[in-house]
Amino acid sequence: MSQETALGAALKSAVQTMSKKKQTDMIAEHIYRKYDVFKYFKPLAIGIDQDLIAALPQYDAALIARVLANHCRRPRYIKSLARGGKRFDLNNRFKGEVSAEEKAIAQQHPSMQTAKAAEDAPAQTAPNTVENTAEISENNESK
């Protein structure tokens, strides 16, 4: 068990007087600033929620879970899961692998389907492409 300092208790009390939205925004900002695994959307280790709760005792555990859930729903995170590979802990160290089943589930996620559809869509040519511009200038010169 860790003993809470007077400063820690004061910080916890001050944070808890804020709205839930402000608290979750503050937690998210802190997590993205402090942990590269979040900043770069790497696949997270199983059980990282407990590690976060232990690392951030000044915040409510339910709000930490909410921030983590929001992170894991982001398309960029889902894309990293769909690629598969290693999972990482808070210290950016290897801790497990993305299973084939988890990878398949991520690949079937609606955000991955819309991203794939956007990649597969034919690129529309702009009216003033290089070819069109050359053609227009040739026509103008011949007049």
Image (tube, grey):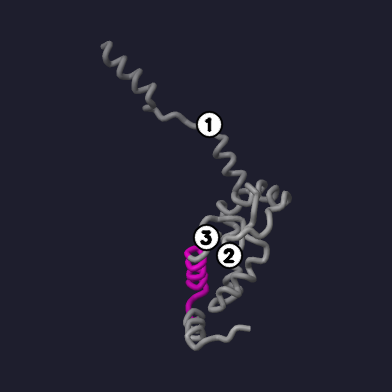
Q: Residues within 10 Å of mark 1 (few under 14, many from 20)?
A: few
Q: Is the C-beta separation of discs 1 and 2 under 8 Å?
A: no
Residue labelled with disc 2: 90
On-image quarter of the C terminus: top left
Q: Residue 36 location, x and y as percent?
A: 52, 60
How far is disc 1 from disc 2 in space, using C-alphas? Answer: 40 Å
Secondary structure mostly seen in the magenta stretch: helix
Of the two numbered discs 3 and 1 on the same chain, state the one appearing first in sequence. 3
Query: Mark 3 vs mark 2: which is more N-terminal?
Result: 3
Outermost residue to the top: 142
In percent of width and height, residue 20 lies at: 52, 74
Cα–Cα gap, marks 3 and 2: 8 Å
Residue 26 counted in the magenta span: yes
Mark 3–mark 1 Cα distance, whole angstroms, equals: 35 Å
Q: Which residue is at a point 51% across and 59% down the rendered structure image?
A: 39
The amino acid type of the residue labelled 2 equals Leu
* For residue 102, above or below residue 118: below
Residue 124 falls inside the magenta stretch: no
Task: Name the residue furthest bottom.
Answer: 6
Image: 111 above or below 121: below
Q: Residue at x 33, y 19 (%)?
A: 136
Q: Residue at x 54, y 76 (%)?
A: 59
Which disc number belongs to residue 36? 3
Q: Residues in magenta?
A: 17-33
| Element type at mark 3 | helix
Identify residue type, mark 1: Pro
State which quadrant residue 132 falls in.
top left
From the viewer's perspective, tell me whether residue 47 is left or right of residue 15: right
Identify residue type, mark 3.
Asp
* Residue located at (55% from left, 59% from top): 37
Name the mark on residue 122.
1
